[in-house]
Image: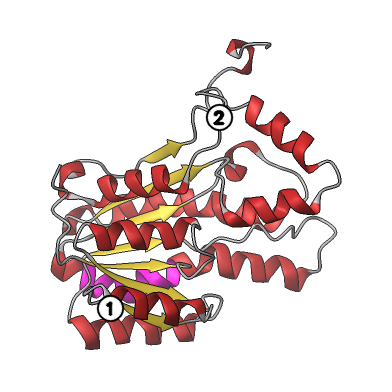
Amino acid sequence: MNLQLKDKVVAVTGAAGIKGSIGETIVQHLANEGAIPVIICRNDRGFAYEKELQERGVDAIFIKTDLSDYHQIEKAAKKIEEKYGRLDVLINNVGVNDGAGLDASMDDFMYSLKLNMVSYFAMTKFCLPMLKKSKGNILNIGSKVALTGQGGTSGYAAAKGGVYGLTREWAVDLLPFGIRCNAIVIAESWTPAYDNWIKTLKNGEEKLKTIVSKIPLENRMTTPAEIANQCLFTISALSSHTTGQFIAVDGGYVHLDRSLLPLS
C-alpha cells in the first residue's frame, strides 16, 4: 500500500531515544516510506541517527533541542524552514513519565508540563505557518495515563490530558486551513525504557506477567512497530478525512471490559 509519504518532510519530537523506542521507530518507518524525517530531541544519539539515515540516502537531519525550552523550539522550527522551506507533518512525540506526583516540588510539576505538553503547543505554534502552506497535518502522541490514571504521576497525567484537549481544540481551529489534527493513545508498549523499568523492580517478571495478562488482544504488549504503522497511516493521505480523533493502539487495554478476559 502506497502511503504517499515519499519526500514529505516530517518532524518528530523526542525521536532520539534508545534504538527501538517509539520515536526512533517512527523515524525508521518514515525513512522506509521515502519520507524525510526531521529528528528534534535533546539527546546526542540524534547525531548518530542522522548519520545513519544519510548514509542510507535519506535527506534527514537532527536538530538538537531541549523541548522544555520554547526558545529552542522556535529556533528548531526556523532551521526546518531554512533547510527544507516547508513542513508537511508534525508528530509531537516527546513524553517522559517522570513520576511528578502530589509529593513532587512545584518546579518538578511545572517542568513535567513544559516537557510533556507545552512543547506540543510551542512546536505547533512555531511550525504552523509552514503547515498552513503545505496543508499538512499534526499527530500528537498521548498516553492511556490521561484516561485511566496511574497514581504518583500528576504532572505526566495532567500534561497528556492537556494533549488530548489540544488535539480537539486544534482540529477545530485549523479546519479553515484544511489541517487535520489527531492523537494516538498508547497503553502498554514494549520499549527499551519499559524493559529498563521492569528490571528495576524486585518482582519485575511477576509484575510484567500481571500487566500482560490484562491486555485483551492476544495478552501481549503493543510493539513500537505497530504504533509506528498506525502513525504513518494516520498522517498519510489515505486517512484524509480523519481529524480530532483519539486513536488507541493498545490491544483493547483502555476500553474493553476486563471481565471478558479469560481466567487461564
**Image side of residue 214 versus residue 16, left or right:** right
Give me the residue at 16% from left, 61% from top.
Answer: 135
Q: Is residue 25 above or below residue 245?
A: below
What's the residue type where badge 2 is placed? Tyr
Q: Main secondary structure of the magenta part?
A: helix
Dividing the image into 4 quarters, which one contains the C terminus?
top right
Give me the residue at 48% from left, 43% from top.
Answer: 223
**Image side of residue 222 versus residue 92, left or right:** right
Give me the residue at 15% from left, 42% from top.
Answer: 1
Distance from Cα at disc 2 to Cα at disc 1: 38 Å
Q: Which residues are magenta?
A: 121-131
* Residue receiving disc 1: 54
Name, please, the residue furthest toward the front: 55
Q: Is residue 111 above or below residue 156?
A: below
Question: In the rendered image, which quarter is residue 113 located in?
Answer: bottom right
**Image side of residue 162 versus residue 96, left or right:** left
Question: In the rendered image, which quarter is residue 229 located in?
Answer: top left
Nearer-N-terminus badge (2/1): 1
Which of the numbered marks, if any, corresponds to residue 253?
2
What's the residue type where badge 1 is placed? Gln
Image position, residue 96 (x, y; %): 61, 61
Mark 2 crowd level (few <14, some 14–19, many ≥20, 10 Å Cα): many
Q: Nearer the viewer, residue 83 or 55?
A: 55
